[in-house]
Image: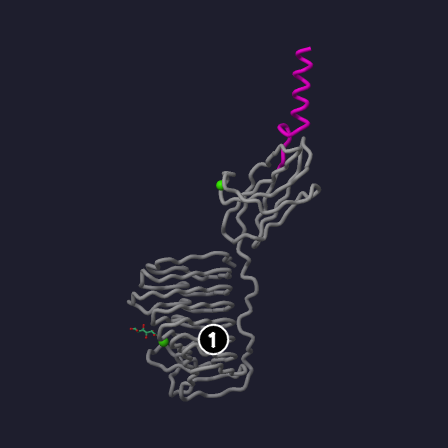
Amino acid sequence: MIRKLFLGGLLLAAASTSWGAINLTATAGAGQVSLSWSYSGSTPTVQEIYRDLDSNPNGRVRIASVSTSTRSYVDTGVSGGTTYYYWIKNTVSGVAENSNVASATPSGSGGGTISGSSCGTSGAQTTVNATIRVTSGTYDGGCQRFNAGSALGDGSQSEGQLPVFRVENGATLRNIVIGTNGADGIHTYNGAVLDNIYWMNVGEDAMTIKSSGTTTVRNIEGYDADDKFFQINAASTLNVSNCIIHRAGKVLRQNGGTTFQINVSVDRCDINDMGEGVFRTDSSSSTARLTNSRLHDAGTVCIGPWSSCTQSGNTNY
Ligand code: DGU
Ligand code: CA
Ligand code: CA
């Protein structure tokens, strides 16, 4: 009689939860984690998915509640390079059982769309003998090719060349091809927007921030910057998105020996064949961020005593 009662207790336990198991696996993808799970010995009833940034379930958050028949889930709310921990929780008649913890580290989104500039290089050509100043509103170049004349420089590494464009006070420069003589590229003063710019052969540098402000640079593409692509000569903010930079010493240089603060963000860029690296400063108060980008032979990402220099969501190819 005693033995029979004991067996009955065990059977009851098996029919509820304590002998069941939920076997969870997590597979990392580009910008996502795929979960799949199976049951042995218990019945899927109320299924919830939990996620955490460590394997201790304290502090985990519920990211989904799924139907009784579901056995897989794709979590797209993740960042590349971060390790995530998951559980499936199944509740039957108020009694909860949890799966094993499964973890995965997704890669970056691979940059999403990185398309560079939509200006081809076959537009009409103009020679620029005096820097074109854009002081307000928008200057739209219609994807014409602007070649520096010798009055501006020869596109070599010599300092003191003049820029092809100078953009000031938040004005916008759009749809420009800088031709095979790049001279000193584009200078910005007190903030500017540079949109859809193609540098066929960067001269001494592609763009210089000459005075404080926020410079926004998007949808750009540039080739063969022997030294630096972006030169930053004033305390300022630079936000770059959707760029292709092909062959350069480095993507960005804060002016040598300066200690003012710059804040730089580069998102969704394809950076390939850098001689030295990506960001270089001598200032310990400056910050830089490289996100959602694709890198190939990009060298060292953070060079110098950056206060903060971070990367996330990037992939190497
Ligand atoms: O002494 O300041 O190349 O602004 C060196 C100079 C040099 C700058 C820089 C620039 O760092 O002229 O393009
Ligand atoms: Ca935790
Ligand atoms: Ca320069």
Using a 10 Å C-alpha cutoff, classify the residue at mark 1 as few (fewer than 14 neighbours), some (14 to 19) or many (20 or more).
Answer: many
Residue 130 visible somewhere in the drawing: yes
Residue 169 horizontal/vertical position (percent): 41, 78
Q: Quadrant of ligand 1?
A: bottom left
Q: Nearer the viewer, residue 45 or 256?
A: 45
Q: Residue furthest right?
A: 69
Residue 154 is inside the magenta segment: no
- Counting from the top left corner in percent of width and height, residue 230 is at 40, 71
> What amino acid is labelled 1 in the image?
Leu
Q: Quadrant of residue 182?
A: bottom left
Which residue is at 33% across, 69% downward?
A: 255
Name which quarter of the figure residue 307 lies in. Answer: bottom left
Label 1: state its secondary structure: strand
Report whether 69 appears left or right of 83.
right
Residue depicted at x 53% and y 48%:
105
Query: Is residue 205 at least partly visible in the picture?
Result: no
Magenta stretch in the rendered image: 1-23
Residue 212 horizontal side relative to residue 99, left or right: left
* Location of residue 228 by image quarter: bottom left
Q: Which residue is mark 1?
A: 194
Q: Is residue 8 magenta?
A: yes
Residue 308's spot in the image, x, y percent?
A: 37, 57
Please give the name of the residue rendered at 38% of the width and 77% of the height, measured from the top-left corner: 189
**Dominant secondary structure (helix, strand or loop) of the stretch shown in magenta:** helix
